[in-house]
Image (spheres, rainbow, N blue to C red):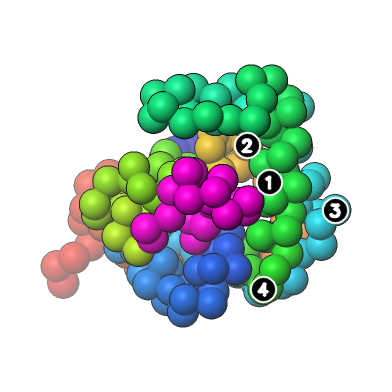
């Protein structure tokens, strides 16, 4: 079994995050707990690349539709259909338009429980209901209802992998193996060294 410190996760700063000049702030928030940046690139993704990204998990269409329907019911919102796959088809078209509207910054972060930790720092998918202190809760005022009213995807700055299994697939989709850099940070001695020795001369 691999040590938790070797876990890697994908983060993509979406076009609105780039346009709002939040790249540095997002990186700072992810560096603070001790995560290590092991890959970084700016690119302009194609619609095909984005569709493949969101459908790497064959269950994504069903799960996403069901989650959106559940959220709408809880908030008393009316959706055009109750079919999860139809809802996701609408969401996917809007996501493709959103994610190809400008450059994105794709990153791979490494560290203990990195996927779970990044999700916690980023906040929930809908900025409106994200906690204060999360990136989405602090920097975005968008909501599902506003996005639906405007006929667009919810603007939430960042994509963050949902599970470690998802992370592995998504990293391979965005990065070649030789783009991931193995290196040691001095801070890792404090984060992961079992005995914390070697500080004193």
Q: Secondary structure at mark 4?
A: loop
Q: Report the Cα–Cα distance between label 3 and label 1.
A: 14 Å
- The answer to whether residue 146 of the structure is visible from this angle is yes
Quarter occupied by the C terminus: bottom left
Q: Is residue 148 magenta?
A: yes
Q: Which mark's residue is nearer the viewer, 1 or 4?
A: 4
Comes first in the chain, label 4 or label 3: 3
Q: Is residue 84 above or below residue 148?
A: above
Q: Are the residues flagged by discs 1 and 4 in contact, CB closer than 8 Å?
A: no
Q: Which mark's residue is nearer the viewer, 2 or 3?
A: 3
Comes first in the chain, label 4 or label 2: 4
Q: Is residue 41 magenta?
A: no
Where residue 134 appears, as percent x and y from the top left, is 31, 53
How packed mark 1 is, by other alpha carbons closer than 10 Å (few <14, some 14-19, many 20 or more), is many
Q: Secondary structure at mark 3?
A: helix
Q: Are the residues flagged by discs 4 and 2 in contact, CB closer than 8 Å?
A: no
On the rendered structure, is 58 left or right of 103?
right
Residue at the disc numbered 3 = 48
Residue at the disc numbered 1 = 170
Q: Are the residues flagged by discs 3 and 1 in contact, CB closer than 8 Å?
A: no
Comes first in the chain, label 2 or label 3: 3
How packed mark 2 is, by other alpha carbons closer than 10 Å (few <14, some 14-19, many 20 or more), is some
Q: Report the Cα–Cα distance between label 1 and label 4.
A: 18 Å
Where residue 158 appears, as percent x and y from the top left, is 51, 57
Seen at 68% across and 51% down, the residue is 95
- Depth check: 58 or 76 in front? 76
Comes first in the chain, label 1 or label 4: 4
Range of the magenta residues? 140-160
Q: Report the Cα–Cα distance between label 1 and label 2.
A: 6 Å
Residue at the disc numbered 4 = 103
């Amino acid at each position: 079994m691999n040590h938790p410190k070797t876990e890697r996760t994908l983060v993509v700063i979406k076009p609105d995050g780039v346009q709002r000049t939040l790249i540095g702030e997002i990186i700072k928030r992810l560096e603070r707990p001790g995560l290590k940046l092991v890959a970084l690139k700016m690119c302009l993704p194609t619609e095909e690349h984005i569709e493949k990204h969101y459908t790497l998990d064959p269950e994504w269409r069903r799960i996403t539709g069901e989650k959106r329907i559940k959220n709408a019911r809880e908030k008393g919102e009316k959706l055009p259909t109750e079919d999860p796959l139809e809802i996701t088809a609408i969401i996917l078209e809007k996501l493709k338009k959103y994610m190809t509207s400008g450059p994105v910054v794709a990153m791979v972060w490494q560290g203990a429980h990195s996927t779970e930790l990044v999700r916690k720092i980023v906040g929930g998918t809908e900025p409106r209901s994200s906690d204060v202190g999360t990136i989405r809760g602090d920097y975005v005022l968008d909501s599902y209802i506003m996005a639906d009213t405007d006929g667009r995807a919810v603007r939430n700055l960042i994509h963050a992998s949902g599970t470690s299994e998802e992370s592995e697939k998504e990293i391979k989709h965005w990065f070649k193996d030789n783009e991931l850099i193995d290196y040691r940070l001095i801070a890792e001695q404090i984060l992961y060294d079992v005995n914390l020795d070697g500080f004193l001369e």
